[in-house]
Image: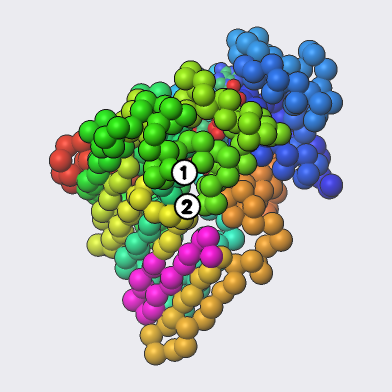
Amino acid sequence: MSGKVLTVAVIGYGARGNIYTNYMKELGTLRPVCVCELIEKKRELAAKKFSLGKEALFEDENEFFAERRADVLLIATPDRAHYRHAIKGLDLGYDLLLEKPISPDEKECRAICALAQEKKRKVSVCHVLRYAPFYRKIREIIASGELGEPVTISQTENVGYWHQAHSFIRGNWRNSKESSCMILQKCCHDLDIIRWLMEVRCKKVSSFGSLLYFDRAHAPEGSADFCYRCKLEKECPYDAIAFYTGKPDSLTSTGRYFGEKATKEEVRACLSDESNPYARCVFRCDNDVVDHQVVNLLFEGGKTAQLTMTAFSKDFKRTIKVHLTGGEIVGDIAANSIEYTAWGKDTVKIDVTKLADDLSHHCGGDKLLVRDFYDYICGNPSGKGLTAVENSLESHLMAFAAERSRLNGGIPVDIGE
Ligand SMILES: NC(=O)c1ccc[n+]([C@@H]2O[C@H](COP(=O)([O-])OP(=O)(O)OC[C@H]3O[C@@H](n4cnc5c(N)ncnc54)[C@H](O)[C@@H]3O)[C@@H](O)[C@H]2O)c1
């Protein structure tokens, strides 16, 4: 550890709050000193991890925000709470590390940005992929000029059929009224990366997409409302019990959503509880977010990009192709592979695993974002502030425009300043 220590107030100690604070602890220069969290068990975990007394733990956000309690504020609460917590934090004079999306509402995003400017506070949005060595390398190749200038980019967000089922059909981000529309929730990262690599502003957007498959009309004949009493369990790829007790390609097979140490029997018992959202048939949920969407983007200077988001993929990964005037770059983030070719020359292959020691959590992005947040807040020369809220607002506006276009039959939508 070197450098002065910044104290951190944390609101929302769930999955994301845990990851960032773990990296803070590892770094040593960002020290969580108080936590506001609705769930008692999670508050207790935080207390243990950061040696916090009762006076540093809050269930009620009003008490937590009654005064400023640290140098910076980490906001890792659900999407629809970000605006309220960010405004309260900025009013108290905190600099913020704010989870994405800034807010599901365009006006609220603009208001946070404006208040940060008025109060002269720094706000870093957790667009962690800008820090992932994979995308940094691609940006470095583009910036070198060796391949000329970017003309068009095509990115695919392969959500993964099982990840869609877990997060966007049964889980926390299934319904846009409770969280955000898919193109903002899942793809604000993709749009942000495209904007960053293109190096110029996006002017116009059009988009198509829908919830095509995961609805009651597609429920197989004879299927039941809950997997535990469905006779099609063996042939259904979305069977919750198989998912959560160890289907091979499932992120969720560890049972961590039912307690880290849950046995298969305990998981089965949870999935026989009809109040458990993860016990539901994927064709009979209250989901409304799309399962596929395409976005066309027009940038300054006539440059273009295209994004495809699909639930219908085996893998959970992003792939990208950047076409430049003098060559192309092809990347697969899950394979840690980048290849680039200057016209007439041999293809260069890059093994991304050689670029960093730790590629966990967004391919190394989470850890590097936390590090940079510290330097950015301290004003250290190495602090890049790549995800300052004004940058993130720009790519959020691309997402809002895409959603407006999609809801209006794909008409082109201009992006304002
Ligand atoms: N940067 C990324 O790539 C990325 C990835 C996943 C999630 N996210 C975003 O991170 C945010 C949190 O997601 P998560 O997966 O950690 O969810 P989570 O449900 O695991 O954690 C959220 C926590 O906030 C707590 N909470 C809710 N309202 C609160 C309040 N008023 N006061 C105090 N605590 C409150 C909940 O009890 C929960 O523990 C979401 O906005 C999500 O979209 C970002």
Q: Secondary structure at mark 2?
A: loop
User: What residue sits 39% from the left and 54% below the top?
Assistant: 313
User: Which residue carries the number 2 mark?
Assistant: 316
Q: Is residue 169 above or below residue 141?
A: above
For marks 1 and 2, the one nearer the N-term is: 1
User: What residue sits 51% from the left and 70% below the top?
Assistant: 338
Q: Is residue 271 toward the left or the right of residue 295 in the image? A: right
The amino acid marked with disc number 1 is His
Q: Position of residue 398 (x, y in %)?
A: 33, 44
Residue 292 visible to the viewer: yes
Q: Position of residue 349 (x, y in %)?
A: 53, 78
Q: Is residue 225 toward the left or the right of residue 15 in the image? A: left
Q: Is residue 333 above or below residue 76?
A: below
Answer whether residue 407 is magenta in the image: no
User: Which residue carries the number 1 mark?
Assistant: 163
Q: Main secondary structure of the magenta part?
A: strand
Residue stretch rendered in magenta on the structure: 321-335
Do callouts 1 and 2 mark residues in contact (Cβ within 8 Å)? yes
Q: Is residue 57 toward the left or the right of residue 88 in the image? A: right
User: What residue sits 39% from the left and 45% below the top?
Assistant: 235
Question: Based on the displayed image, in which of its 4 quarters is residue 111 positioned?
Answer: top left
Q: Position of residue 3 (x, y in %)?
A: 81, 45
Mark 1 vs mark 2, CA separation in Å? 7 Å
Q: Secondary structure at mark 1?
A: helix
User: What residue sits 40% from the left and 31% below the top?
Assistant: 230
Q: Residue furthest front?
A: 231
Q: Which image quadrant shows ligand 1?
A: top right
